[in-house]
Amino acid sequence: MLEKLRIQNFKSWQDTGDIAFGSLTGFFGTNSSGKSSILQFLLMLKQTVESSDRSRVLHLGDDKSYVDLGTMYDILHQHQDPGVLSFEFTWKAANVFFHEELNADNEFWVHEPLIFKADVMRSSDNIQLKSFQYTVDNEVIGVRIVPLVLDELYHKLYSYSQHKSGFEKNGPLVKPLKFYSANQYISFNSIAFDDIHLENNLPYELEELFNRIHYLGPLREYPSRLYVWAGEQTQSVGNRGERAVAALLSSRNQGPTIDMGPDQPKRTVEEHVAHWLKELGLIYSFKVQPIAPNRKEYEVRIQRTAESASVFLTDVGFGVSQILPVLVLLFYVPEGSTVILEQPEIHLHPAVQAGLADVFIDAIKRRKLQIVLESHSEHLLQRLQRRIAENTLQPDTAIDPAAVKLYFTHIEAGRSELTTLQLDEYGNIHNWPKGFFGDAFEEAAARTKAEMKRKMRQS
């Protein structure tokens, strides 16, 4: 899971500073203030990792990718030319690394946080990887890539030795592989890494981080009367939730996977999604069924109340089809995944928006998910604050404030600025920007004042 991120010279961000991530990380802010750009940056790295072109330093997007950012000119802050995009992130390794000596806990094999840094340069229309490095247990390994001549495709590695003579040793010619790998690594510091297995494992760990990231965008597919599923195991619900029903059907092959606690039977994904749709007050019953035996066409049938007739998904309120991909994604992805959600509250009633906070807490606790979201919902935030205040009172439904990281973005002097919201153990935010969600008391007072004036004129 992500622990920390810093981006420099990306779109409206000159420098985000260090962004700490928790089990639930929320970005709030005005329109076009830069909050979506932070999520887009992570998606850009994810689609680069997944790209089949190993020599492509950054995959900025196309019509089939998670995000289409245009060209390097478009993403560099104030369109610098030449310009350098710098970034750094920290995450917890999925695998273990070997210590040559026992650590403080008398362990040889431990899960170590990994730190990755990179500089990507734009010069005219060229995108070049200047440097990258990994840090493992305070040891640094990486490369600095310097062109021999400007037009050459191959680059020379320079190993910066810590010998007393201070000389620089020229390495072999290599070609970078995406933004995070090369044919060979050279240690930046005085202690060289002789463990080639470790060097090969670092790019794999980075790829695993981004393979565990799943995304759902703010604009979702309209519901359909029929869904076709031929039995394939889908990996996601799709960027627009278009494969949510396919994911539900795929989950049937896994059987019950949702742990409901001691002495309770596990639920299937389908059962748990139906539970939450009912808990949020959207439906009474929910069923995905084939239109006839031995057919690959399926229909989603909904009962709004216990007394109402069963109808198609298309014949109920739009909110059900919009929240369905959110619920399926949270309970279908592998445990320990990171889920990125843009405006999960869109098209939802205020009461359901508030209930989303409970859904997120449930997914975090039952499935060890990390949720990163961008939202405008005051109702979602207030429910989250309430659950923080209830932390020691109702531990099953509450959340520890230490697990929640909230940020506010705004524009100042043409640059995006990030404010860490000061959240206390009772759910209070001490530095929330005044008037961002509007002022209900001020609006009520103004309405009452206008009412009194009108009545006085009429009398």
Image (tube, grey):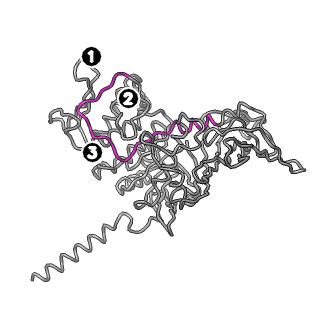
**Label for residue 319?**
3
Q: Amino acid at mark 3?
A: Gly
Q: Is residue 80 left or right of residue 440?
A: right
Q: Quadrant of the C terminus?
A: bottom left
- Label 1 – label 3 distance at C-alpha: 31 Å
Mark nearest the camera among 1 and 2 is 1
**Label for residue 294?**
1
Task: Give SS at disc 3.
Answer: helix
Q: Which residue is mark 2?
A: 267
Region rendered in magenta = 203-231
- Name the N-terminal-most of marks 2 and 3: 2
Instruction: Locate residue 281: give its quadrant.
Output: top left
Q: Position of residue 339 (x, y in %)?
A: 46, 42
Residue at the outermost top position: 294
Does 223 appear in magenta?
yes
Q: In the depicted view, which residue is nearer to us: 34 or 124?
A: 124
Task: Give SS at disc 2.
Answer: loop
Task: Give SS at disc 1.
Answer: loop
- Check whether the beta carbons of the residues at disc 1 and disc 2 lie within 8 A of each other: no
Residue at the outermost right position: 165
Question: Residue visible at 38% across and 26% down?
Answer: 250
Q: Vertically, is 164 above or below 276? A: below
Q: Quadrant of the N terminus?
A: top right
Question: Residue visible at 66% across and 33% down?
Answer: 201
Q: Position of residue 451 (x, y in %)?
A: 18, 75
- Label 1 – label 2 distance at C-alpha: 26 Å
Does 87 appear in magenta?
no
**Label for residue 245?**
none
Q: In the depicted view, which residue is nearer to us: 177 or 127?
A: 127
